[in-house]
Image (cartoon, grey):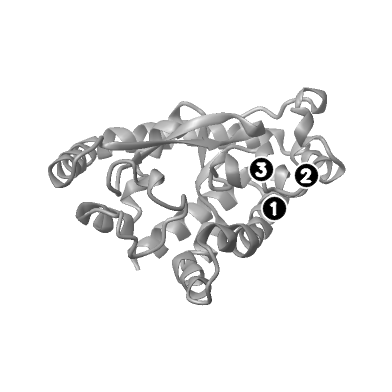
Amino acid sequence: MLLKKWEDIPDNLKNSAVKEYYDILSHKKLQLILKRIVDIIISFILLVILSPIMLIIALLIKIDSRGPVFYRQERITTYGQKFKIFKFRTMVQDADKMGSLVTIGKDPRITRVGSKIRKYRIDEVPQLINILIGQMSFVGTRPEVEKYVEKYNDEMKATLLMPAGVTSKASIEYRNEDEIITTFLNKGEKTDDIYINRVLPEKMKWNLEYIKEFNVFKDIKIMIDTVINVIK
């Protein structure tokens, strides 16, 4: 991944808060190139190794419920670019038209097979395709849908200087996100309001700290920590 010149960055990202993070990354250009090289090598190897397992999961999804194997939702990545994320479908067809875009633990829209593969984040495996073609990275801010990105304050927009990620320190620290949302749901708040006003700002603190401390070796540590937390 190459960092664009400041003048080439979209105008909606140009503010003093983003410039501070841009200046930090401008001194880490070699690390950004190494990050992309690591993403390409590991994603290619994993796609080859995991392809038989992905085929089995695809068959189970088709047998379990009506609809496509993959869930392709539009998300936002580097510099505000839109892309369609690859995920194994874990919910009933057209689930995003039946409720919030935020999903919590026992959401009735989740299928039987979906509940199993979500538990171990297997639904995220197809994002190896997004990583290989450069739309995502292994580590970075989770890609949000546009309606949530529109709620970013000036500083939060700095996360769009780097590719969206499959995992992050924020994802690890907020692995109990469902429980947090459920707590406030029980107090009468709406799911989207909880996510935008309570969860997103806290996750963004971790995501912004990641940019300040970014290097490839820390990326690898976050990837290892993610695997450990998933298999606990």
Residue at image point 56% right, 30% down: 82
* Residue 124: % across, % down: 37, 46
Q: Specify few, some or many for label 3: CA neighbours under 10 Å numbering under 14, 14-19, or 20 or more.
A: few
Residue visible at 44% across and 29% down? 132
Task: Single out the residue that lies furthest toward the right.
Answer: 16
Residue type pointed to by label 2: Tyr
Mark 2 neighbour density, 10 Å: few (under 14) some (14–19) many (20 or more): some
- Helix, strand or loop at label 1? It is helix
Reading the image, the residue beneath label 1 is: 208
Q: Mark 3 highlights which residue? A: 150
Q: Quadrant of residue 11?
A: top right
Tell us which disc is closer to us: 3 or 1: 3
Query: For the residue labelled by badge 3, is the local secondary structure a helix, a strand or a loop?
Result: loop
Quadrant including the C terminus? bottom left
Percent coordinates x, y for residue 189 in the rendering:
55, 68
User: Which residue is located at x 74 percent, y 40 percent?
Assistant: 25
Q: Earlier in the sequence, mark 3 or mark 2?
A: 2
Q: Nearer the viewer, residue 151 or 59?
A: 151
Query: Which amino acid does the dot numbered 1 rest on?
Result: Leu
Marked residue nearer the N-terminal end (1 or 2): 2
Is residue 165 shown left or right of residue 8? left
Mark 2, residue position? 21
Residue 162 at what x, y percent from top left? 64, 38
Q: Amino acid at mark 3?
A: Glu
Distance in Å between CA atoms under marks 3 and 1: 17 Å
Disc 1 to disc 2: CB gap under 8 Å: yes
The spot of residue 110 in percent (x, y) is 29, 55
Gap between marks 1 and 2 measured at Cα? 8 Å
